[in-house]
Image (cartoon, rainbow, N blue to C red):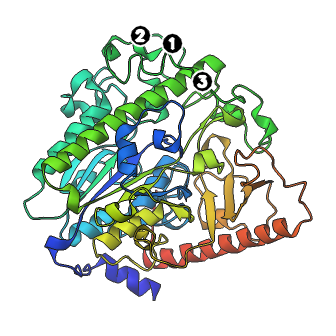
Amino acid sequence: MLIACLLSTIGAQSAPAREVETRPNIIMLFTDDQREGTFSADGHPFHQTPNFDALIGESIRFDTTYTATPVCSPSRVSLLTGLSERTHGVGFGTAYALNEAQWATTYPALLQAAGYFTGFIGKFGVEYYTFRGQAADRFDFWWGHDGWTKFLPKQHGGGACKPYHRAEADIITPIMGEAMAAFLDAVPEGKPFCLSVSFNVPHGSQATSMHTGYEGWHRMTRPANENPALAGSPFYDTLHRDETVEIPQQTATDPYAHIPERIQQQDKGRRNQVYDYNYTRETNLEHHIRYGQMIAGLDHVLGELLADLDRRHLRDNTVILFGSDHGLLMGEYGMGGKALLYELAARIPCFVFDPTVSETRGGATVSELVTSTDLTATMLDYAAVEASEAIEGKSLRPLIEGDDVLWRDELFLESLFVLRDTPFQEGVRRGNWKYIRMFDGVNGWDESDINFAGRSPEFEMLFNLKADPGEQQNLIDDLADSPVLADLRARCANLSEAANARRQAYMQAVLPTRR
């Protein structure tokens, strides 16, 4: 049944159930490295996000949302496909690349086939691993780039953003704002659209490249506003620099007090390669300031987009979804970066603006367990496009509309990123509990490497999130003989085996391409 359904999806797409005129426009806003709790509407002590706050006040907010996987490339493929990394197989340390059959089941391909005008702006994050030089052909409007651009792309050589040096101060975020206006100009009259905006900020590469004149690529040892290009900016010059900015108490402390060195050696990439998260308290403070500045600049561009939608009389028929590829550790546990299943790396901000319910339910917070692949299913639902049977996300529309529905009571978590000495990780979140188990990672993994049946984990963590929301007390030894731990271990093993079974069925229907 699954194979037949997938093959039919890859072929002729189902006709939309509604007339074109009644289908809403869809905008998917996706940030990079933005963790939960970073809007002033969330009570953040110094971030300034008035436009996000206002939109959240009209939206349904999902405050317990996990990314499909806390690493950028596989997370982005998961959003496109509605599948976990284990199923779609595409990421930094896997043996596979996205192929044409898989692309045909992505939400942009499905909506385009159903009559939507599709656009992509920003960091594609997939072309680097496949479709090199061909991604633009998969959208009606393309303003994307692969890999990591810089915060000031022209100042750093331009790269993929070279044709778009028009914005004031040549900063990537307002450049993307201009691209959103260009997309709206290009939409054919009377045609619904789906715009995917993949912001670069507040990613670590953006923070470090705000100013490199004194510090090199991996350092934040000097204030970014020493860069003359940022002088006078309301966001990137003096914002937050005269405020009291608290940094994590664990900054620059021993990371091995939390995850042993035998499991993950910090110096193999988390502390001194790729991005420098070997913080001193001074560089950590500078990162927090820059992080807040980038989010403020992002907020300004959102405000311009909303004003543009209003000017064009589009807001009343446009659904806006918001998420991030993953969160970020910024000194907590003596660490930085992502790829771990701690809440700060695995949780993301998430909300959906639906103009049909904003007056009656706007500002509501939903605490059910949500995952980023649910956003994929939600977009397909709004567009009245049938998803393949393989999709793992669930449409959020019942929760958005306030229906009394039976929702998931547990969520399987995974991180299969293995570079920089990161282990394989699996976990389960249920109720107040979160259980995580770790295994030695294998670069270039395939199915045999992620079958953990009968294997003993190298390391485990157990947290009571109600009593310990900061995940400071690993209870794995304290509750070694408890029914709670036994049950969570069994559930994690069962969910892992079920995930592998889904992967096997998916491989038979849509054979992933090996690199």
Kind of element beneath mark 1: loop
What is the C-alpha distance between the residues marked 3 and 2?
A: 17 Å
Three-letter amino acid code of the residue under disc 2: Glu
Q: Position of residue 346 (x, y in %)?
A: 59, 51
Q: Position of residue 44 (x, y in %)?
A: 53, 37
Q: Which mark is residue 222?
A: 1
Mark 2–mark 1 contact, CB under 8 Å? yes
Q: Is residue 178 above or below residue 9?
A: above
Point 31% across, 70% down: residue? 382
When asked about the image quadrant of residue 491, the answer is: bottom right
Mark 3–mark 2 contact, CB under 8 Å? no
Q: Residues within 10 Å of mark 1 (few under 14, many from 20)?
A: some
When asked about the image quadrant of residue 164, the answer is: top left
Three-letter amino acid code of the residue under disc 1: Arg
Q: Is residue 204 above or below residue 232?
A: below
Q: Residues within 10 Å of mark 3 (few under 14, many from 20)?
A: many
Kind of element beneath mark 2: helix
Q: Position of residue 48 (x, y in %)?
A: 43, 32
Residue at mark 3: 284
Residue at mark 2: 226
What is the C-alpha distance between the residues marked 2 and 1?
A: 8 Å
Q: Which mark is residue 261?
A: none
Q: Could you tell whether 316 is left or right of 346 in the image?
A: left
Three-letter amino acid code of the residue under disc 3: Asn
Q: Position of residue 334 (x, y in %)?
A: 71, 32
Q: Nearer the viewer, residue 92 or 81?
A: 81
Point 65% across, 31% down: residue? 331
Quarter of the figure with the N terminus: bottom left
